[in-house]
Image (cartoon, rainbow, N blue to C red):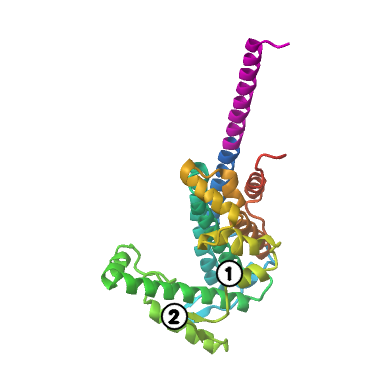
């Protein structure tokens, strides 16, 4: 028979073993979290470089074809078609880079599930817009229609912001920008630039429609793109309409429980953030696959492979 003292020692040893296992599990989880955050930072840096530096391209790539296309006449100035597509894609690439940095911060902090989900949704959206503009499965003219449609939306958004802030505030921002002119619209008259684009599009015989918020040359929406882009693998629709729909308050029952519990715990574990933030993975995957086919050159292959491995590693077999 085991004496009372021996039983007490056994219980104490068992309890200490459980505590050691919990501590070890916590350390391993933190190590996975930190490794993933580092990988996200590297992808963010890579995206920043893709947004700022010229792209390498193959001789027979769609990107090279766009460089050979006729210049686009917009009012009293011309722009190369490839430059328009590059810029409108880069705007979103840099947006994705900035949001990826934010996602890494939220992973490390483990303090906000909904904040991370919302940022992941933003990453996916920015990547999807960047992808749509350089889609290699359509013609140069079709890409140009998308690029100019995105520019119309951007210029119209600037006008709405100016109206909300007041002319004085907006003008003050422009005057301190330090650039005498910007062919993409920052220091130009956005209303005139919109008119120039509409005139050009109509001159090409392209249908132009006046929507509630902006003119539109070709219909574009996140829902349509996530369903129809060639390089999608199925997760894109989920990343946009299901997991990330929590950003709109449509919480799944288990997630609602976690959100409620997190108010008491003050933490949102990284594995839960990963589970509901698939857009942070699906967006870069789709964009990089599309960019490789558009330019004929792969980009961030090693960085993305490491990011993907860590994103789907939640403690099981590597």
Q: Position of residue 296 (x, y in %)?
A: 68, 61
Q: Nearer the viewer, mark 2 or mark 1?
A: 1
Q: Nearer the viewer, residue 265 or 79?
A: 265
In this picture, which residue range is highlighted in magenta?
1-30
Q: Are marks 2 and 1 in contact (CB under 8 Å)?
A: no
Our reading of the magenta stretch's main secondary structure is helix
Residue wearing tag 1 = 222
Cα separation between marks 2 and 1: 22 Å
Q: Earlier in the sequence, mark 2 or mark 1?
A: 2
Residue wearing tag 2 = 194
Structural crowding at the residue carrying mark 2, measured as other residues with C-alpha within 10 Å and reported as few (<14), some (14–19) or many (≥20): many
Q: Residue at x 51, y 67 (%)?
A: 87
The number of numbered discs placed on residues in the rendered structure image is 2
**3 in relation to 54, above or below:** above
Q: Residue at x 66, y 69 (%)?
A: 227
Q: Quadrant of the C terminus?
A: top right
Q: Quadrant of the N terminus?
A: top right
Q: Position of residue 210 (x, y in %)?
A: 48, 85
Q: Position of residue 47 (x, y in %)?
A: 55, 54
Mark yes or no: residue 9 visible: yes
Residue 6 forms part of the magenta stretch = yes
Going by the image, does 170 lie left or right of 99? Answer: left
Q: Residue at x 55, y 48 (%)?
A: 258
User: SS class of the residue under badge 1?
Assistant: helix
Mark yes or no: residue 295 visible: no
């Amino acid at each position: 028979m085991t004496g009372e003292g021996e039983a007490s020692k056994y219980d104490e040893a068992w309890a200490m073993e459980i505590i050691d296992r919990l501590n070890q599990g916590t350390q391993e989880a933190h190590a996975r979290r930190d490794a993933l955050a580092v990988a996200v930072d590297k992808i963010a840096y890579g995206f920043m470089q893709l947004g700022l530096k010229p792209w390498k391209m193959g001789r027979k790539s769609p990107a090279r074809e766009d460089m050979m296309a006729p210049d686009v006449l917009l009012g009293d100035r011309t722009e190369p078609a490839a430059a328009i597509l590059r810029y409108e894609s880069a705007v979103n690439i840099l947006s994705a880079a900035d949001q990826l940095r934010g996602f890494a911060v939220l992973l490390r902090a483990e303090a906000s599930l909904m904040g991370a989900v919302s940022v992941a949704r933003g990453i996916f959206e920015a990547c999807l817009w960047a992808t749509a503009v350089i889609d290699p499965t359509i013609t140069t003219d079709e890409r140009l229609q998308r690029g100019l449609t995105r520019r119309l939306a951007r210029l119209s958004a600037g006008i709405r912001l100016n109206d909300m802030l007041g002319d004085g505030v907006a003008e003050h921002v422009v005057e301190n920008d330090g650039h005498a002119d910007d062919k993409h619209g920052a220091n130009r008259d956005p209303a005139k630039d919109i008119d120039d684009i509409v005139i050009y599009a109509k001159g090409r015989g392209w249908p132009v429609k006046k929507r509630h918020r902006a003119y539109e040359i070709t219909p574009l929406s996140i829902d349509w793109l996530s369903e129809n882009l060639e390089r999608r693998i199925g997760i894109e629709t989920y990343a946009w309409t299901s997991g990330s729909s929590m950003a709109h308050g449509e919480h799944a029952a288990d997630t609602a429980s976690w959100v409620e519990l997190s108010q008491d715990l003050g933490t949102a574990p990284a594995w839960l953030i990963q589970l509901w933030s698939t857009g942070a993975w699906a967006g870069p995957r789709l964009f990089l696959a599309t960019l490789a086919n558009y330019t004929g050159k792969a980009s961030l292959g090693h960085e993305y492979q490491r990011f993907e491995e860590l994103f789907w590693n939640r403690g099981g077999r590597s």
